[in-house]
Amino acid sequence: MKSFMPSSLRKILEQRLIDASAPCRIDSGGTWDIKAMALPMEGIEPATVNMALTLRTWVHLSPFKDGWVGISSEGFPHAEQYPLENLPFNSLFGLFFAAISYFGFHGFQVNIRSDSPVKSALGGSSTAIIALIKALSKITVILGRKKLSCREILHLGYYLEDGVNNGNCGLQDQAAAAYGGVNRWIWRYGNRSSPFKRDSLLNIKGQKELSRHILVAYSGKSHVSSLINRSWVNDFLSGTTRAGWIKANDIVRELAEAIKEMDWNGAAGLLKNEMAIRREITPDALIPITEKLVDQAESTGCGARFAGAGAGGSIWAMGKKDKIRDLRKIWDTTLAPIKDAGILDCSIDPTGVK
């Protein structure tokens, strides 16, 4: 991959509009995808299991004045517009301006829309950057340049986000957005040719079945992951919580096998076990409402976990179909009085960025 000379997209987008989308995700074993944790512990094969959801983030490109770039996003009150030579990489939309600067395009606007709530811990910004790079790569093909592969889009999206955020960004959000489906990721940043190994756990039929065994809810409380992740990494690096992280990793590896075998009751138990360790090593991941939701899931016979870095955001549960049906009624009642909270209508999305 390489950068390009500045090109205006105005005339191209006056003739055709360009769209792209990518799926959000739920996960178990998150944070292990941060290289500061995974790289020193590569010998234990740090793992994350995640599942792409039919809650997709959409990027739409439309024409704008030459020399300028604009970005807006549903759920955010203000758009940003700057000349190409002055794009800020530290503003609200700085990550997306950084991607645009890499390609050297101008004369267009970006509108971002997501099926998931804003700051719901389902991988929003990472999903959006993958969708944006896909949209920009469609332009490169129109201009007669090389098409970016899924792996190249993932590579570029991750390193842009990690760089703009001064490190401590993981790879799993972008990975789920790029590939879709249900995957176990083994993080191996010491491998120069590939920072991960991807194991697809279920085929299309299995993914449809899994959709009947999960439940995802938004707590109504938004979250910000950067400061939370940083404190967890610092505790890990100091050795304070490292033993707990290693135990959690063992459980996540077992969880991947249970999902692969479609042992939903066993998977629920393992999710509950991981959550027990997470309560010890990442106690700030739960706030009162999400802790209540997890407790309700466990008392119903399901396992449940916060998505992403927690501290608000979304909760997801796994269990037998009858247990999930029971839990849906309980969560509906619990979340009904909370503004913007509720169960999210979604299933496993087998398709990655497109």
Image: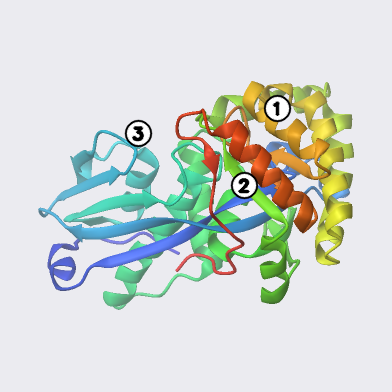
For residue 279, what is the image quadrant? top right
Q: Is residue 168 visible?
A: no
- Indicate how the structure is coloured in the image: rainbow
Residue found 66% across the figure and 69% down from its top: 208
Distance between mark 1 and mark 3 Cα atoms: 30 Å
Distance between mark 2 and mark 3 Cα atoms: 27 Å
Q: Position of residue 321 (x, y in %)?
A: 76, 57
Residue designated by label 3: 92
Q: Is residue 156 left or right of residue 81?
A: right
Q: Is residue 261 visible?
A: yes
Residue found 52% across the figure and 33% down from its top: 166
Q: Is residue 195 left or right of residue 77?
A: right
Query: For the C terminus, which image quadrant?
Result: bottom left
Residue found 49% across the figure and 52% down from its top: 127
Residue designated by label 1: 291
Three-letter code, disc 3: Leu
Q: Regarding mark 2 in the picture, which secondary structure is present there?
A: strand
Looking at the image, which is closer to me, 36 or 185? 185
Residue 5 lies, with reference to residue 67, above or below; the image says: below
Q: Residue 118 carries which label?
A: none
The earlier-in-sequence mark between 2 and 3 is 3
Q: Regarding mark 3 in the picture, which secondary structure is present there?
A: loop
The earlier-in-sequence mark between 2 and 1 is 2
Three-letter code, disc 2: Val
Residue designated by label 2: 216
Residue 75 lies, with reference to residue 133, above or below; the image says: above
